[in-house]
Image (cartoon, coloured by chain):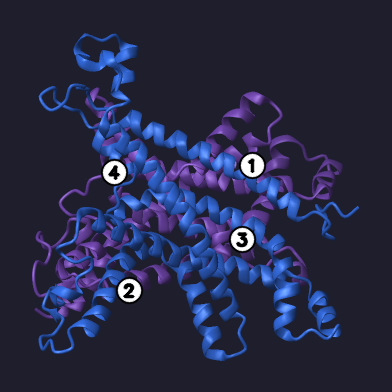
Amino acid sequence: MFEFCTNPETLGDFQWFACYFTTGKLFNFYGSFVTVLVLLFITAPTALAFGFLGAMSARSHVAPVSWLGKAYIAIVRGVPDIAFFMFFVIALDQGFEYLRHQALCPDWDQPIRQGNDFIVCAQAKLPLSTSDQWVHEVYGFFLAVLTFSIVFGAFAANVLFGAMRAVPHGQMETAEAYGMSHRQAFWRVLVPQMWMYAMPGLGNLWMILIKATPLLFLLGVEDIVYWARELGGSINPRFTDYPHGDWRAQFFFGLLVFYLCFTRVSEIAFDRLSRRLAHGQAIATGGAS
Amino acid sequence: MSCIETIQDYALRSIGIGERLLPKTDFTLCQQFTLIGSGMIWNLYFGALALLVGFFIASAVAVGKSARSPWLRKPSEWFIFVFRGSPLFIQFFFAYVMFLKVKQAGYMPWLTSAQAGALIVLILNTSAYSGEIFNGALKAVPRGDIEAAKAYGITGWSRFRRITWPTMLRLAWPAYTNEAIFLFHATTLVFFSGFPTWRQQGDALYYASYFADKTFNPFVPYPILAGYFILLTLCVIGLYGLVNKRLNRHLPAERKRKLRIRPNLIR
């Protein structure tokens, strides 16, 4: 990177670190922060959409739909989310492959589950065994995003369901007195007002989501935890120009600080946002007076 | 091999009693139920001990955070901030590497084992979360209660122990129940976060993922695990509900706080 980096053994401390922090491997580490941020910014809206659907179906007047929504909300309460993560990544993968198998190879006569193996025809493999490495990585990341969205969608559904019920009943009655249909009242009165009640819950959820991102490591994505372990381990001078001892503690300390800053900044942002949303509302902390 | 034999061989496998080798082929449902259930022993161990010890530390932290002296307040605030602001997963990794360094320096080699090291992390983590909950409740203790205590001449430690603390617990209990549920869920992370398993003695998720890896079929072991955890969650809610009843027993019926479980709003 820098010109003086040609012979690292002769460098002083400061220059040594300047060179070390600009080696190619370290850029993989920096890139993994982007991976985490991308995951967060795709997952958050998707999970919110899933949550909205879940909350709407839980409110439905059709009994089976409402059971489905309520079951979706209830199941995440009792079970550790990490179990869901590990389940969905395999289950979704096999589900996709099974569907493609049904569509692409109709004249396949062997059973798909043979003992301890899951066998689909070669065309149905996801991603195809001939595709490049990056396709595999993107597919793995896509599965992770979907898994996160399903799990956090259930959390969000619970928050939104509560928020919809927290909107004062008089508001809906007034809307109907003005002649709005059920659907109109829902979209024009209930939905705009519920955000204020949902805000504390959603803010909390965002924090949980941030703190769940290291679990990407368990889903096989090369995220910050993966690189911190990889780069932090002691390196022999034979394999690198920048040998060092066991630096995992330093790397993990860096991650700890990163997460602390991230959650703190989010906390402040959410405080501001909820104060703005409460503006003009007739509640104790609102700015109505 | 009948199911009874399987249970005899594997029911206590996670603490090293019974058959030494895990099943390798021809997995039966019975084996999966037994081994995953056996792993629950560790989840119970981590969760129960962390809650027990964490409860007292949390009370101290809550009092410390509302103390007037900055020497008490600042450390409590930072403790809560660090453990609530960072992922438990990273805390486990960081703690494990630190414990490893301590071991290499020649002190306390037992710290790197999951039974001790991970338990310490869980204790500190739950202390921070519960400390924040207790601190919120401490601020919500009705002023009238304290004034009544003052009028009766109850002061100092006696007032804290007999008036403030029980009221704080009563107010915090619903949220604290959620924290307990979440802590039991968090115990599944232990063996995936650097802490090694010793002779394949792992927790429920460890065995569930073992079966999922071997059979390449997630649809059996994970629902079994989910079933066990739903049972555990119901037990926790039941037990904490009993305590909640006792904490509220002096109140007239209509003012009793019902235990409402909304886990995701807390953590």
Please name which of the two marks, 1 or 3, marks the residue nearer to the observer: 1
Q: Which residue bears the numbered disc 2? A: B223
Identified at 52% across, 84% down, the residue is: A67
Residue that label 1 marks? A268
* B233, above or below A111, in the image: above
Can I make out residue B239 in this image? no
Q: Position of residue B91 (x, y in %)?
A: 40, 40
Under circle 4, the secondary element is: helix
> Where is residue B102 shown, x and y percent of the image?
29, 27
Could you tell me which chain the residue with mark 4 belongs to? A
Q: Nearer the viewer, residue A26 or B135?
A: A26
Q: Position of residue A173 (x, y in %)?
A: 82, 81
Marks 4 and 1, Cα distance to the nearest angstrom? 29 Å
State the residue position of label 4.
A226
Q: Are marks 4 and 3 on the same chain?
A: no
Which mark is first along the chain, 1 or 4? 4
Amino acid carrying mark 4 in the image: Tyr
The colour chain A appears in is: blue
Chain that the image shows in purple: B
Instruction: Determine which quarter of the picture holds residue B187.
Output: bottom left
Question: Which residue does the numbered mark 3 point to in the structure image?
Answer: B174
Question: Is disc 4 in contact with disc 1, using a CB cutoff of under 8 Å?
Answer: no
> Do marks 1 and 3 share a chain?
no
Name the secondary structure under disc 3. Answer: helix
Chain under disc 1? A
Residue mark closest to the camera, 2 vs 1 = 1
How many residues crowd mark 2 within 10 Å: few (<14), some (14–19), many (20+)? some
